[in-house]
Amino acid sequence: MTGAPLEDVQRVEIEYCTQCRWLPRAAWLAQELLTTFETELTELALKPGTGGVFVVRVNDEVVWDRREQGFPEPTAVKQAVRDRVAPGKSLGHSDK
């Protein structure tokens, strides 16, 4: 196996509803996360789904589910991701 050791893998997955046409929203959130965590993340995946799904997972742990929490503000998702992949990282104005 090549790449980062398994314990160093930091994978984010955004599952979005194709029926609702939420790809642009998922792609924009992916861009925000990749920009913020460019050195911390080893992978970010967009996963097509159905039935109104919009779920963000970090290493298979759900950190945001639209059905329970509504659509996320980027700041809230960045904080949830940061708390799992880089707890000491400052998010600058996003932490306020």
Image (cartoon, rainbow, N blue to C red):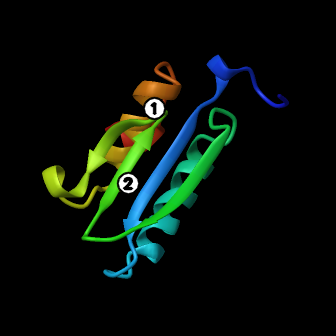
Up-down relation of residue 15 to residue 49 (above or below): above
Amino acid type shown at disc 1 = Arg
Circle number at residue 82: 1
66 displayed left or right of 75: left
Up-down relation of residue 1 to residue 63 (above or below): above
Q: Give how far apart the Cα atoms at labels 2 and 1 are.
A: 12 Å
How many C-alpha atoms fall within 10 Å of the one at disc 2: few (<14), some, or many (≥20)? Answer: some
59 displayed left or right of 34: left
Q: Residue visible at 64% across and 28% down?
A: 9
State the residue position of label 2.
Answer: 74
Of the 4 image quadrants, the one containing the N terminus is top right
> x, y (%) of residue 68?
14, 50
Circle number at residue 61: none
Judging from the image, what secondary structure is the residue with disc 2 in? helix
Amino acid type shown at disc 2 = Pro
* Disc nearer the start of the sequence (2/1): 2
- Picture quarter containing residue 42? top right
Residue 46 versus residue 86: which sits nearer the camera?
46
